[in-house]
Amino acid sequence: MRDLDTRASATPNSDARIKASDLLVKALENEGVEYIFGVPGEENLDFVESLRTSNIRLILTRHEQAAGFMAATYGRLTGKAGVCLATLGPGATNLVTAAAYATLGAMPMLMITGQKPIKASKQGRFQIVDVVAMMRPITKFAKQIVNGDTIPSLVREAFRLAEEERPGAVHLELPEDIAAEVVTDRALFTARSPRRPSCDERAIEEAVAMIRAAKHPLLLVGAGANRKRIIGALEGFVEKTGIPFFNTQMGKGVIGRFHELYIGTAALSDGDYLHCAIDRADLVINAGHDVVEKPPFLMEHGGKQVIHVNFSPAAVDEVYFPQLELIGDVASSFRRIAAALEPSPGHDFSYFMRVRETVLAHIRERSDDPAYPLVPQRIVADVRAVMPRDGIIALDNGAYKIWFARNYLTQQSNTVLLDNALATMGAGLPSAMMAAFLNPGRRVMAICGDGGFMMNSQELETAVRLELDLVVLILRDDAYGMIRWKQAAADLPDWGLEFGNPDFVQYANSYGAVGHRVGATEDFQGILENSFRDGGVHVVEAPIDYSDNKRVLIDELHESACVVV
C-alpha cells in the first residue's frame, strides 16, 4: 500500500495548460503505471492519443473481460494496481466480472472507462448505462470525472484505495468532453510507503499465552496472508515454533519451505482427511482469514479456540467467531509472537503427522495410473513433474481445480494462481498470460477445462502477438464437469451439461500457436516437456476421466477419513 504525500512531484507553471486526457496519463505515469490492458472505443480516443506519446504501453486484448483478468493478476503478482481500459456501455459491462474477481480476490486494479459527453450530447441515451452506479457495489471506489482539474487527486485516491489492505478494484469514468477539455497543468501527488499500525502488545502477549497453553496448536494460512512481507514472517514463525500448518486454496504456496510440517490444503469445506487434524486441534492460529473463501473448518461454541491475525477485524458469522483478534500488520504480529516463543514440550503433533502421511499417501494414489482418458491424479502428478520449483500454474475453474488444490505440492509462493473467491470461469488463460508476461524465462502453464477455455479462448491471439512462452493445457470432457459432479453428488440424473468442442489442435494452429493432442497417457508428460523446451504458445488437449470424483472426493472421505487416520 502507498499513502498520500502532499508534496508535488513537479511544480508546473501555474499558467500552463494541458488537455485533461494528457493530465490523466501524466498522473498514471506518476503512479508508476507500466501497462494498460484493454479494448478502447470512440469515447477513449483522446485518452488513447495521449497514451501514444507516453512511456505506458497499451496492450490490446480481444475482450474487455480478459483485459480485466490480466490487470487483476498484475496486481496480485506485483502488489501495484493493474490498469485496464474499456469504452462506455458494452465495453464497461464486460469489465463487471473482472471487477468482482479483483475485489473478492483482493487484487489491486484500476478500471478506466469512457462515456458520452456529459455537458452536451446529440445522441440521447445511445449506449448509455450508469456505469458508476453499476460498479459501485463491486469496487472500493467508483467515480465519474466531471472536472479535469480534479484528475491528480482522484487518481491518487483511486490508487491508494486499490492498494491498501484489503486490496481490490476501483473505477474512474472519463467522459468524452472532459477528456478533451483544456485544464491547468496541475502538480501531481507522490506516493510513499506508510508505516502500518502494529497490533496492541497486550494482544500479542495473550496470543503467546494461548499458544503455550495449547496441546495441539495448528497454523492456518489463508488468502490474506499471500503478501510478500507476510511470507517471510510466517516461515520464521514455523521455523521457530515447529507448529504444523495447512492452507486454504488461495493461501496455497504462501509458505514454500518446511514441507515436513505441511499437512495439506483445505480444498473441500469438510470431510477430507485434512479435516481430521482440524477437528483434533485445540487452537487454530488463523493467518489472513478472508470471508470470501469457504471456511475450512466449522467452529462450535465450547470447541476449539481461534486466534484471528489480520489487518482488519474478523467478519463474524455462524462458523467464525475467534476468541482473540490480533489486528494490525500481520508480518509484525507473527514476528513478535515468534520472538516470544520456543518449541514447547507440551505440544503434541503426533496425530497431525499421521494425518500428513495419510494425505500424502492419498495424493500418491493413481498418480502413475496408465488409464486413458487420463485420471486427474495422473494429470496433477505429470504436471508437477515438468514444473520446476519456480514454475507457475494458473487454474481456471472446474473440478480439476480441486484436484490441483489438494494434490499439487508447492515449493515457492505465488506459483499456484487460482480463484476461490468469485471462482469464475474464463480467468485461467488471461491470468497465465499475465504471469508469463511478467516472468519471462519461467515456465508458466494455464490449466483450463474445455468449458472455461472457450470463454476467453480468443486471447490466444493476444498471447501469440505478445510472443509469450506459455503452455495451455485443456482438460477435455465435453461437459461442464464441476456442475456435472455436483449433480451426481446430489443423486440427480445426468442431464443438460454436455456440449461439443472444436478441434483444439486446428484451433490453436489457426492463431499461430502450436496444437497438440494427447493420444496416449504415456505421451502426456513428454508433450508438456517438449512444449516448454520449444518455446512459444502451445495448446495441449488431454481427455480427462472424472468418474473418480464422487468416490474419492465425497463417498470415501466422508465415510472413512478419520477412521483411516
Image (tube, helix red, strand yellow):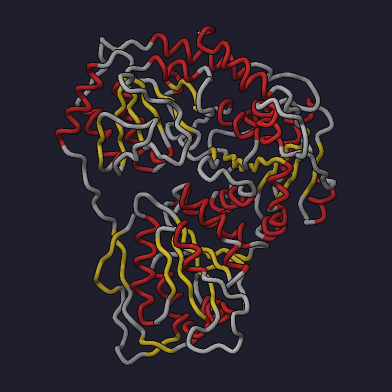
Give the answer, above or below, for where 91 lies relative to 552.
Answer: below
Residue depicted at 65% across the width and 31% down the height: 486
Residue depicted at 80% across the width and 34% down the height: 518
Q: Is 60 situated left or right of 11 in this image?
A: right
Count of numbered labels shown in the rendering? 0
Give the image location of residue 327, x and y in percent: 25, 40
Residue depicted at 47% across the width and 68% down the height: 132
Give the image location of residue 375, x and y in percent: 72, 25
Task: Give 433 or 314, whichever is nearer the viewer.
Answer: 314
Q: Is 245 situated left or right of 45 in this image?
A: left
Residue depicted at 83% across the width and 44% down the height: 500
Residue occupying the far bottom of the picture: 15
Give the answer, above or below, for where 436 lies relative to 334.
Answer: below
Determine which quarter of the picture holds residue 223.
Answer: top left
Residue occupying the far left of the picture: 202
Q: In which quarter of the image is the N terminus?
A: bottom left
Determine which quarter of the picture holds residue 408.
Answer: top right
Give the image location of residue 492, x and y in percent: 71, 29
Give the image location of residue 234, x and y in percent: 34, 32
Give the answer, above or below, for where 59 lies relative to 488.
Answer: below
